[in-house]
Image: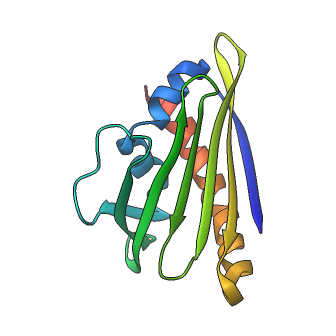
Amino acid sequence: MKVFISSKLPCDADRAFALVKKSSTLVHVAWPMAKIVPSRNSFPEQWVQGKKVYCKSYLFGIVPVGERSIYFERIDPHKREIQTRENDPLVQKWDHLISIKPIDSSSCIYADEIDIKAGLITFVVWMWAMCFYKHRQSRWLKLLEED
């Protein structure tokens, strides 16, 4: 099943892409629906194409989901896209494409597209992902307002 959520952000596309490449941004925008902490090594300051990171996820900051692997398949600064391949004990496939498209010099469209496969619980995971990515994008807006 696929999730697609997009939002208009009040910043230029290059600034949004610079922020999306930072691991601290992921941790910030996921909270409090999910707490994400590195499990094997610390997160790099910026995500690196071709690298895999491991993290532990906690729903609502307390319910452990297990270790998740996130492989950064592609980080394309020209298209302003990041493609990850992710999985954890509950979800066999969580392919996530982040794309940022300029609207004008002070705004852009930020989009999350996720392809999910989780066996019998795919629908439940898909519903949670819909809520989670709406939450993440609202946190993006708050992050930019605070800046």
Q: Nearer the viewer, residue 41 or 3?
A: 41
> If the image is split into quadrants, where does the C terminus sit?
top left
Q: As drawn, which residue projects farthest toward the left?
A: 41
Residue 11 seen in the figure: no
Outermost residue to the top: 105
Q: Is residue 127 left or right of residue 146?
A: right
Q: From the viewer's perspective, is residue 31 above or below residue 29?
A: below
Q: In the image, is 85 to the left or to the right of 47?
A: right
Residue 71 in the image: x percent, y percent? 46, 55
Name the image quarter holding residue 116.
bottom right
Residue at position x 42%, y 65% from top?
69
Percent position of residue 118, x then y: 64, 80
Please determine whether, in this image, residue 12 is positioned above or below residue 9: above
81 shown above or below 126:
above
The outermost residue toward the front is: 50
In screen coordinates, is 6 left or right of 140? Answer: right
Q: Quadrant of residue 44?
A: top left
The residue lying toward the viewer, choosing from 131 and 79, is 79
Residue 14's x, y, as percent?
55, 19
How many numbered marks appear?
Answer: 0
Q: Position of residue 90 (x, y in %)?
A: 54, 82
> The N terminus is located in which quarter?
bottom right
Give the residue drawn at x 62%, y 59%: 95
Residue sitting at x 64%, y 27%: 79
Q: How is the image coloured?
A: rainbow
- Can residue 86 be seen here? The reply is yes
**Left or right: where does residue 70 sit relative to residue 12?**
left
